[in-house]
Image (cartoon, helix red, strand yellow):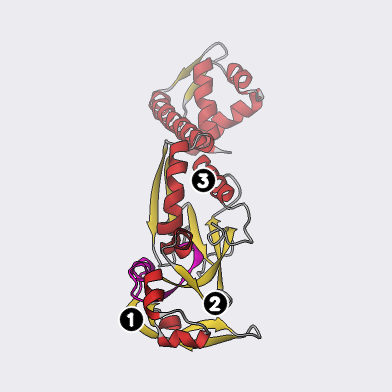
Amino acid sequence: MDRLQSMRVFAKVVEQGSFAGAAKALDISNAVVTRHVADLEEHLGTRLLNRTTRRLSLTETGHAYLERVTQILQEIDDAEAIASSHAKKPSGTLRIYSLLGFGQLQLAQLLPAYAAQYPDVTLDVTVSDRTVDLVEDRFDVGFFVDFQKFDASMVARQLGVSEILLCASPQYVKTHGAPRTREDISKHACLNFSFEQVRHSWPAKDENGETTQIPVSNKVISNNGDLLRQCALAGMGIVLRPSFALGDDLAAGRLVRLLPGHELGRLSVVMVYPSRRLLSAKVRTFVDFIAKQYPRPDSDPWLEK
């Protein structure tokens, strides 16, 4: 039998002073109550209760056992109450992972509104270009782009499709001109990621939709996208970044888009969390909050600003 339930039945028998009283209080039969107590005594190898036709009393061992059982059952009830409360009211620490560029430039703008709405939730946010394992690293929610790997069993909710943009500051364009063709990119100072895939060339689709690689001349190389963005804002060269990283600068006129008629690639941005079932209130409210910010998952919300 369920030992925990047997402990509850035993405690109830003592509380009610009889097997019949415990059976009534727990809405089970007298036979089930008797079986729980008997199984518990057999498991422990000792008698817990002295039974006569007129009264019930604890043995010395029963007294000591009841004291510990009462503490254990109270701690379990307290733990269940805490878990139930967290399931109903958003509270506690919400651990979030985000790709660096998205976290710094988009997620950071959204978190204040969520925090104001749910003040009992503490936001623990990690932004990094290192892909993490949400379950192993104990994150509640993650924000990824489609080339990052995450467990296929996770729930993945697409937020938008971010277009890869070629941009420079108005100052740079005024001084050096703008590339008119894809091949012109090679003549300009480029602000480039240190990743091997793009370190020496940038992808661009030709008129037939086929991707070709355009050799680039690097002015700055870095593993940090925001550093490259800051260099672009300072007029040091042209930069290749997704719209979620540059859309706000384009809307404000701090950067201008180059070669807008040429497609340089797209990235799906997805919100990932471990399960749809039995989400805690903090995860459920956060997932719903973010989804409301991106109602058109097949569009590019960062370019449409």
Looking at the image, is mark 1 or mark 3 earlier in the sequence?
Answer: 1
Please state the extent of the stretch shown in magenta in the rendering: 222-245
Give the mark toward the camera: 3 or 2.
Answer: 2
- Rendered image: mark on residue 264: 2
Residue at 49% x, 24% y: name it: 11
Q: Is residue 132 left or right of residue 160?
A: left
Query: Which residue shows up at 34% across the image and 78% down it?
Result: 221
Q: Mark 3: which amino acid?
A: Phe
Name the residue at the top extreme.
54
Q: Which residue is mark 1?
A: 219
Q: Residues within 10 Å of mark 1 (few under 14, many from 20)?
A: some
| Nearest to the observer: residue 92 or residue 117 | 117
Residue 19 picture quarter: top right
Quickly name the residue at label 3. Answer: 286
Please name whichever residue, 262 or 152, is drawn nearer the observer in this view of the structure: 262
Q: Could you classify mark 2 by the number of other residues whose Cα lies within 10 Å: few (under 14), some (14-19), or many (20 or more)?
A: many
Q: CA distance from mark 1 to mark 2?
A: 20 Å
The answer to whether any part of residue 16 appears in the image is yes
